Image: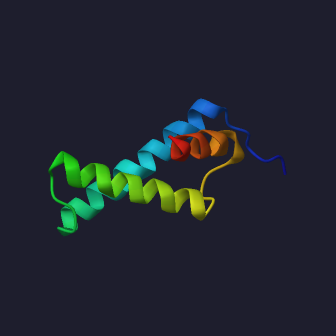
Amino acid sequence: MKELQFNKSTDLYNLILGGLIALTSEQHIGKVTYRSVSENIFLGKWLKKAKQQKRYPRSIALLLIFTFKL
């Protein structure tokens, strides 16, 4: 069975969508407030965790590595 191949923009879209879904879920539970500072902190930690757990394909792995070097 042939594995589906996605392009870099689709992978990046999925990464962003996953982060926003996680943020909305945490806000709904009440763990993250609706202030931009707490949203940014949450998304930064979430992105770091996603990189450590290698949740996303190699096509955007270099983008994640570059982001954390800034």
Residue 64, position in %: x, y? 57, 45
Please name the residue shown 16% across and 58% down the image: 33
Residue 36's place in the image compared with 24, above or below, is above
Q: Residue furthest right?
A: 1
Residue 5 at x, y = what percent? 73, 39
Q: What colour scheme has been applied to the protein in the rendered image?
A: rainbow
Q: Nearer the viewer, residue 2 or 57?
A: 57
- Is residue 29 shown left or right of residue 69? left
Which residue: 21% across, 62% down? 32
The image quarter in which residue 66 lies: top right
Count the marks: how many? 0
Which residue is depicted at the point 67% across and 48% down? 57
On the picture, is 15 further left or further right than 60? left
Please provide percent x and percent y for residue 10.
Answer: 57, 35
- Vertical order, 6 against 28 (above or below): above
Horizontal relation, residue 23 to residue 33: left or right: right
Residue sitting nearer the eye, 59 or 28: 59
Q: Quadrant of residue 45?
A: bottom left
Point out the residue furthest to the front here.
70
Q: Is residue 36 above or below residue 28?
A: above
Residue 9 image position (x, y, % from top left):
58, 30
Residue at point 15% right, 52% down? 34
